[in-house]
Image (spheres, rainbow, N blue to C red):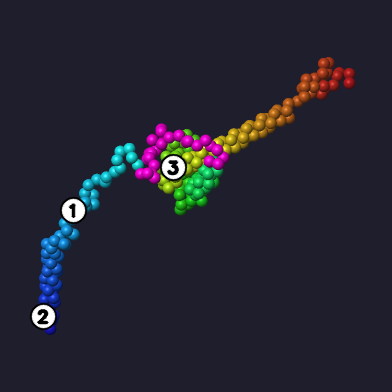
Amino acid sequence: MTRRRATARAGLGAAALFAGLAVAACDDQMKRIPFFKTMSWQESVEAYEEPARGAVAGTMPIDGERSHDLLAADTLLANPLAGTEEELARGATLFRQFCTPCHGVSGDGDGPAVGPNRIPDIPLLDLHSDLARSYSDGYVWGIITNGRGLMPPYRRIPADERWHIVAHVRRLQAEAAAEAADAEEAASVETTAAATAADRGGALPAEAASPAPGSDPSSGGRSPGS
C-alpha cells in the first residue's frame, strides 16, 4: 500500500509539472497570434526607461507659480504688501490656521503640537529669536513655501497669501520688541529710583554732618558753656 501511494503521488507530481509546462507553452504560443502579439510586444516606454520630460524652459502651468528655493527667495523676493490693517488681519487668520500648532499664538514656539512625545521644543520654533529676526522677508516666504527641517512645505497656501503670513510675523516681532523695550525701560527707572532712595537714606543732613563753630565735637556738638 505504501509503495502504491508513493507511486501515485509521483505520478500526480509529474502530471502537475507537465500541465504547468503545457500552460506556459500555450501562453508563449498565444503571443504568436496577431491580436495577442500587439498586447505583449507593444511599443511602450517602460518605467525608468527614459528620463521624465519636463516643461519647456521659461514656461509654467497657467495656474501654477514660479519656483523659488530658499536662496532665490532670500535674494530676489521682497514683500509686495503695504501692511494695511486688512492685510495684517488676513495674515493673522492664516497664521492661526497653519502656524499656531507649532509656533504658538504669539510666535513663542509654545504651540499645542510641541512637547514630550510630540514635536521637540527647539529654538527655531521661537519667531522672536535673533536668528528669526535676521531672516529677510523673502527668506521667511521661502521657508513657508519649501519647508525646512521639521517644517513641511505649505505650497497649498496661495503664493500671495504667504506674504500676509510674513507681514503678521513681522508684526508679532515688532510688538514683542516694543514690550521688551518698555519692560527694560521700566526696570531701569525702578532701579534708578531705588538707588536714589538708598543714597538719600544713608547720608546725614549737612547740619548734622559738620559741628557748629565753637562747639566741642566730643560733647555731641554742645558749646563749652552749655
Which residue corresponds to mark 2? 3
Mark 1 / mark 3, whichever is N-terminal: 1
Cα separation between marks 2 and 1? 55 Å
Amino acid type shown at disc 1: Glu
Picture layout, residue 134 above or below residue 220: below
Quadrant in which the N terminus appears: bottom left
The magenta region covers 61-87
* C-beta proximity under 8 Å, tags 1 and 3: no
Amino acid type at mark 3: Ala
Q: CA distance from mark 1 to mark 3?
A: 41 Å
Q: Earlier in the sequence, mark 2 or mark 1?
A: 2
Secondary-structure class at tag 1: loop
- Report x, y in % for residue 123: 47, 42
Residue beneath disc 1: 43
Q: Which numbered disc, 2 or 1, marks the residue closer to the eye?
A: 1
Please tell me which residue is depicted at 52% across the width and 35% down the height of the picture. Answer: 82
**Residue 143: x, y in percent?**
43, 41
